[in-house]
Amino acid sequence: MSSEERAITIFYGPQHPASGHMRIILEVDGDIVVKADPDIGYVHRGIEKLAEYKTYLQVIPLVERQCLPDAAHHNLAYILALEEILGIEPPERAQYLRTLIAEISRIASHLYGMGLHGIAIGSSTAYMWCFGLREYMLLLAEKLTGARITYSYIIPGGVRRDLPQGFSSEVERYLKSFERKMRDLDKLFISNPVTKARLEGVGVLSKNDAIRLGVVGPILRASGISYDVRKARPYAAYQWVDFEVATRKEGDSYARLLVRVKEIQESIRIIRQVLRDLPSGNIFHEKYVKMLPPKIKSYIEDTGRVKFPGVFATLKIPKGEGIGIVEAGRGELIYHLISDGGSKPYRLKISTPSFRNLILFSHLIKGVKVADVPAIYLSLDYFPPEADR
Amino acid sequence: MNKFNELIEKLKLEGLTIEKEDKALRIRVSTAEELVNVLNKLKMQGFDHIKSITATDLPDRNVLEVSYILGSYSHDKMYETLMIITISLSRDNPVLPSISEIFPSSVYHERECYEMFGIKFEGHRDQRHLLLSPEDFTGIYPLRKEFKIEEEGIRG
Amino acid sequence: MLNILKSFRSFIRRIILKTPLKRILGWGVAYSIWPVHMVTSCCGVEFAAMADPLFDSERMGMLPFTSPRQTDAIILEGSLSRKMARAVRLVYEQMQEPKYVISMGACSMDGGIFYNSYNLIRAREVLPVDFYVPGCPPRPEGVMRAVTELQKRIKRGRGLE
């Protein structure tokens, strides 16, 4: 009997310690995988349809709930698409604050992925340490915005709150402790010979295949192509700060892990530059401040928090089409917004990085041993609610 | 805006008409053969992957409008170029040729368009349901405008 | 023969469920509630954060375990879509008595922000729920409070039959 006739079907299903909320249908012949086919849709909530029944501001919490570890980037991409139709640019201080929350969110997202990768390989200490480091970033975000995960910080025209007092020195204290613990994590998990033996040479993606299949994010950069939306089409304050794009040539699972670690170090550099160069000014666009009654205007100037003007409740957008592209933690994120002049969106199309990396399942998980499947699958950093929307 | 001029001149030599918008370039086509033609010419100029396929339902004009967004990873100077191709189809029997032989990165986008709008792609190897199971299908495709869901009755 | 087995079994049950033995049984079950490894939707991020060093859940005896035949509890996080509800029902029927269900988040209570979606159903239509935890997503301290209340209820002896 040939290999395909001997194969039996196994469900690597939703009830599994290392599978997340999706199912991979594997056909296995002995110990070698013959075919892998992803079965998704377990978390499909219909966000694109629901967005047509809510007003423009009510859509902000709706799109944040797609990718909870990395919520600030979805918020930012939607507001960039909306501001392109409205034709306004927020003030400079607001652009710097948007960069700050985006980088905090990127560090939290990478640590989540690394923690789950560690526990699937067998090192549950790495899971505990990575999630413990992630709590540092969530405490900082809570001091700035008021919530641990779902910030809703970015609104059309600026941001919602200004920096609290003494924030810069607290961030510096947290970052020093964070860097010390990252050095310990490096000795324990990243430069460990067991991790290297498990991840080197496993799941190799060549440069030509990466271009042909159209993958995004750290997977693309670990195969030798240095494409990053923050350098190609800069948004927020990225044209005024200085950072490098992390690239490696090998394309295996270990290279993807190293790219993520380097991106965390570059994000810490960006946060320090933003807090050093923060310009003064107001955080909300003047066109909307002029529409407010004087009592609310003095409230904004005294406390530094923005109370939503009543005109936002039924904000009517001119007819048009807008595209917002950002570089989220997992890759390139595109929001395509079409409006017909009313107070609710006509069509919102979201193209998420996890959905565009789906094509790698049937390409990479072929001809490998069954024990290598979690090592490859979790190095792709696939998050099912983001792909299913 | 000037950085796209060189690319526009090269594409005009091939016989394509391009509209320049603020951040992207747009080409409008009207038939299926023209679509395949334009995509083959763009592939030779260096565009090598599909970023998104957007379909919109316009019941007042009785059309379905599909937009393909393309990008390029091969050349450094073309990293920032976005090319949008738009085509209109009739709502009663929408059929398009599948481009998964030219651009392999469009396989899952086409499957999702079939499931949500009912557009059939000829030549697609594997056209099955992706996100919803076939036994839950009620007869109307979910993202068309006649599929209604309940609404809060406070604001109109 | 079957009648003798049945009366023997009910005799043993009446002895074990008398108060002193029931308390000892309750103490044993309450301090080792093992949930199944099944994540239903986006609140799973806060469930994973409950196991990290800041909000340690292992000090209460909670250890997520793989096989459904040897676990006690199932924790539903977030919205249930139709495909996922079929899988959850299969897993629930494989677990052995006594078993408990905790439902996290606003989406499984009554829909939350996705109340009018075409693909979601409510948790109470699929499983009998013991505790609901409100929030979107609830803080890890909220879920730990639900676990503590469940432990008190088990130690009093209810829910063991």
Image: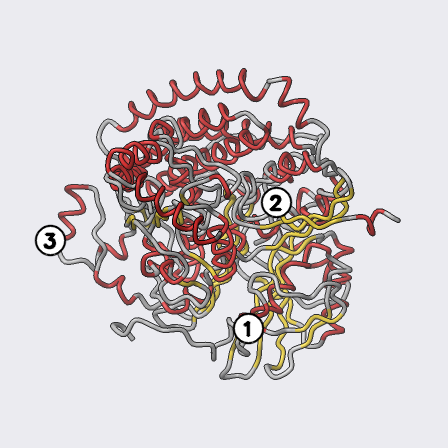
Q: Nearer the viewer, residue A220 or C102?
A: C102
Q: Which residue is mark 2?
A: A216
Q: Secondary structure at mark 1?
A: loop
Which is more foreground, mark 3 or mark 1?
Answer: 1
Q: Are marks 3 and 1 in contact (CB under 8 Å)?
A: no
State the CA–CA distance, disc 3 to disc 1: 54 Å
Q: Amino acid at mark 3?
A: Lys
Q: Position of residue B146 (x, y in %)?
A: 47, 80
Q: What secondary structure is marked by label 3?
A: helix
Quadrant assignment, res A240? top left
Gap in angstroms between the C-alphas marked 2 and 3: 48 Å
Q: Label 3 marks which chain's residue?
A: A
| Label 1 neighbour load within 10 Å: few <14, some 14-19, many 20+ | few
- Residue at 40 percent across and 43 percent down: it is C73
Q: Is residue A259 left or right of residue A185?
A: right
Q: Specify whether disc 3 shares its chain with disc 1.
A: no
Do residues under tags 2 and 1 come within 8 Å of each other at their CB atoms?
no
- Place residue B103 in its image quadrant: bottom right
Report the residue at 67% width, 58% height from top: B106
The numbered disc on residue B137 is 1
Circle 2 residues within 10 Å: few <14, some 14–19, many ≥20: many
Task: Point out the frontmost of discs 2 and 3.
Answer: 2
* Residue at the spot 55% in from the left edge and 64% down from the top edge: B132
Q: Residue furthest left?
A: A295
Q: Which residue is mark 3?
A: A295
